[in-house]
Amino acid sequence: MNSGQYPQAESSSQAAQSHVQYHLPYFTPVEIEQLSEKQRGKLSLSQEEKARQQACAFIDAVGAKTGFPRKTIATAQNLYHRFHLFFPRRSEPSYVDVSLAALSVSTKMHDTLKKPRELIITAYAIRSPELAARSKVAGELDIDPAIIDADRDRILGIERLMLEMICYNFTSRMPFPYVIKIGRAFKATKKLTKLAWRFSIDSFRTLINLQFPPHVIALGCIYLAALLSSFEQGTSPERPGYNNSHQIAATLGKPGEWEDQFQTQVQDLQEIAHTIIDLLIQVAQNPHASTSPSTPSSPHPNRISRSAMKPEPPPVPYKSDQLMRLKIVMREQEFPPKLRDSAASGDLPDAISLGKNEGTTRFLFVPPGIGEDEY
């Protein structure tokens, strides 16, 4: 499906064009809603969001304990979201299996390979820290090999479905390097760029990375960082060679030459900002549901902290009432939504029929104990 696809931004428009045809497709909000509703089943929107955040928490915890770089963790979260556009959610907490399968695929995409057994044991240590506390050897749990083999077969079955879903396309591009480059282009301070980097990490806990290419996500995170740093705040002292957050927010908050330079529009940034603010409001209202790391740095592969066993909620820098006031101000000043070509209702045969060809992996391999109507 290419109806929601965006051009990619590199250092030149020619470089941008060279990556479009190889990247996984993007979806419009209408397409995501149609596909999500079909796979949601009997779950409500709040239950679906809770399951999504639980999965992102789990992926983050397993990735941090295993020592994966941030790009591997973020890609796994993106794969999890994409998987449930085409395969239904089950009533039981099956996010564990899908999350581990997403991590396994992500390790192949970024050459950070780990055996499924290592991921499974790490997952058990995170879900049952009391078992890890009783283990005689640090990092090794006393688990029945038959259980691990059964889990491995089930995860490999879901992994094959996931590989089919992405059409064996191992291309993955992250917004993180764009945050640095675009921050320099707008002469943002290191503090503001670091906050934008933090928001780009949080963006993978939402569906916006299925809707926009990485350079647009990065620009939206810089815009949100500038908004939050300037909203209800006095003007900071001028720093030679840098623009303050008020200036950057004012520039990105209205149409300008930057839209052609970065191949995006102000409406895209507003949509991204609203989505991340909604996530921040959710975290502020329920901080123990927060799952993302407290710093933007990637974990060290040989340094495992106790916090990785049972992740603690990071500090919430913004209060929900402040975020709500910002959303109200943004709604009053926002531009009319941009029209994006989208498949109409009932006009998604290619997407909905994905995985239903009798010659595909879906029918050639079904994980033990999982019916075809479930996956």
Image (tube, rainbow, N blue to C red):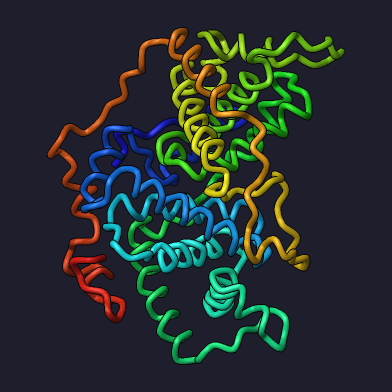
Residue 86 shows in this picture = yes
Q: Residue at x 38, y 55 (%)?
A: 166
Query: On screen, 241 above or below 345?
Result: above
Residue 114 shows in this picture = no
Q: Residue at x 16, y 46 (%)?
A: 349
Residue 6, image x, y percentages: 42, 31
Q: Is residue 32 left or right of residue 66?
A: left
Query: On screen, 337 above or below 102?
Result: above
Q: Residue at x 26, y 57 (%)?
A: 88
Locate the N terminus by quadrant: top left
Residue 224's image quarter? top right
Residue 54, image x, y percentages: 47, 55
Outermost left residue: 346
Q: Residue at x 75, y 60 (%)?
A: 300
Residue 60's image quarter? bottom right
Residue 260, image x, y percentages: 52, 16
Q: Nearer the viewer, residue 331 or 31?
A: 331
Query: On screen, 134 above or below 262?
Result: below
Q: Nearer the viewer, residue 295 or 117?
A: 295
Outermost right residue: 240
Q: Is residue 199 left or right of residue 25?
A: right
Locate the C terminus by quadrant: bottom left
Numbered disc total: 0
Q: Nearer the viewer, residue 88 or 350?
A: 88
Q: Is residue 127 left or right of residue 96?
A: right
Residue 192, image x, y percentages: 72, 26
